[in-house]
Image (spheres, rainbow, N blue to C red):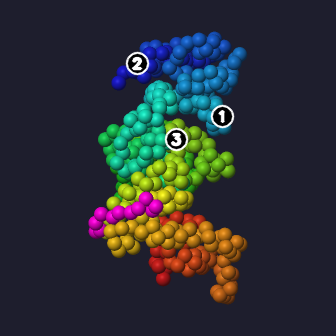
Amino acid sequence: MSHQDFSSNPIMLVDDETEALSLLKSFLCHDGFQNVITFDDSPQALDYFKKMDIALAVIDLRMPKLHGTDLLGAFSELKPYVPVIVVTAESHVDIAIDCMKTGAVDYLTKPITINRFITSVKRALELRRLHDEISLLENSSDGDISARAPQIPSIITRDREMLTLLSYVEVVSKSRQPVLITGETGVGKELVARAVHTLSGLKGGFTSINIAGLDDQMFSDTLFGHRRGAFTGALNDRDGLIMKAAKGTIFLDEIGDLNELSQIKLLRLLQENEYYQLGSDIPLRSDVRLVVATNKNLWQCMNDGKFRKDLYYRLCTHQVAIPPLRKRPDDIPLLLEHFIRQSAKTLGKGKLTYRKELVDFIVTYEFPGNIRELQSIVHDFVSRTTTSKLSTTLLKKIIAREQEPANFLIEHGNKATNPDFNGISFTSFPTLKHAESILIEKALEIAKNNQGTAARLLGITRQALNNRLMRGKGRQ
């Protein structure tokens, strides 16, 4: 694809230093960009920006008359769809973050290399093209959205918000920028991540990593790999997943749990497309696409100082917020039928039928565990059914069991959050491990050994509870 395919409008360069303008223009011309206009006077650049259409602006910060931050603010307010790259000698992280907040798509510190600059320009032009496609989506009618939405067999929906979301996913899948997927536990974040990869057309494979609980060494070793002797036990070289997933997609789940040192390394990977293996000082190039997901509020994590601001702004270029199942009532009958057929096949049962009252009942349930919970309920429901007709009464009993944690909290008040352990005597103050085992035992007792219910009482996922139970067995 030629550069003109992105836009026939000029690229604007603004810097009070003429030598800097000449250098940046030479970088662009060397790579085939011919339509470039330069300004060494920021007020003149603003006047031109107001009157003319441009593809992209590249601006300095320290300029007389009109400072670069003011120019950036004016550009973002006048034409927010025009991407702006800041190139400056100001290397403070806070300044970079402020520029990204104001609307800059990238922040480069001088001196810059031609590769870094051209990569940033191409990314920015790509974002401009994607903005135009997304604008068409936002102005589409319901009929257009249904017809336009890509067919993804693993995602079953007729909800307008979900169809619009899938159309957006199809558009941004062609980008090489990271995609941030948010949503409650069980909404299908990994399914959407796989859809991003499938629709991207990337030749490489899809690799998924849950990074919750990984310390920096484990994260770095998993993603980047290591050289022999990098640490105790590193007897041979190891390729990281970035190398193994070449020209593909890496999905980092639970990104909100990433530790601070790992956040710094991930930021470098996003900024420079480079990484270091453990035990090596030779940078390696990355050609993988990153998709990340979290059920946490990353904005809140950032404000609480638990997540780097500069990393957040690198990750949030493309955001996909998956609505919870309770806000997609029209999808529940479709998913119900799908999971019934799936479970019947898995359990070796024939065709199962049910009355409309069963559907009318299940759509009233809130599904705090979302699609994953619906799938679990249906599988349990089908496994307990002994005839070819599914009973609404049986389903109500299963749903009632799922609601036990909430009912228990309502009925017992503070006793639920402060369980009575009078039957257990301690000869000394309990350790955390001992207290954890007591809490798990009590939760399982209350939940009648239903691990899903016990996990919700404890405020953790079923997988986390399983892991703790397995560790407990290992210590025995």
Q: Do callouts 3 and 1 mark residues in contact (Cβ within 8 Å)?
A: no
Percent coordinates x, y for residue 213 in the rendering: 52, 61
- Which callout, 3 or 1, points to the residue nearer the camera? 3
Amino acid carrying mark 3 in the image: Gln
Location of mark 3 (residue): 319
Percent coordinates x, y for residue 183 in the rendering: 53, 51
- Most foreground residue, 257 or 285: 257
Location of mark 1 (residue): 98
Percent coordinates x, y for residue 219 in the rendering: 48, 55
Query: Is 353 inside the magenta-drawn segment?
Result: yes
Residue 400 against residue 210 in the figure, above or below: below
Q: Which residues are magenta?
A: 348-358
The residue carrying pointer 2 sits among few (fewer than 14), some (14 to 19) or many (20 or more) residues within 10 Å by Cα, namely few
- Which callout, 3 or 2, points to the residue nearer the camera? 3
Of mark 2 and mark 1, the one earlier in the sequence is 2
Measured Cα–Cα span from mark 2 to mark 1: 31 Å
- Residue drawn at 63 percent across, 34 percent down: 101
Percent coordinates x, y for residue 55 in the rendering: 50, 20
- Residue drawn at 50 percent across, 38 percent down: 318
Query: Is 244 inside the magenta-drawn segment?
Result: no
Q: Do callouts 2 and 1 mark residues in contact (Cβ within 8 Å)?
A: no
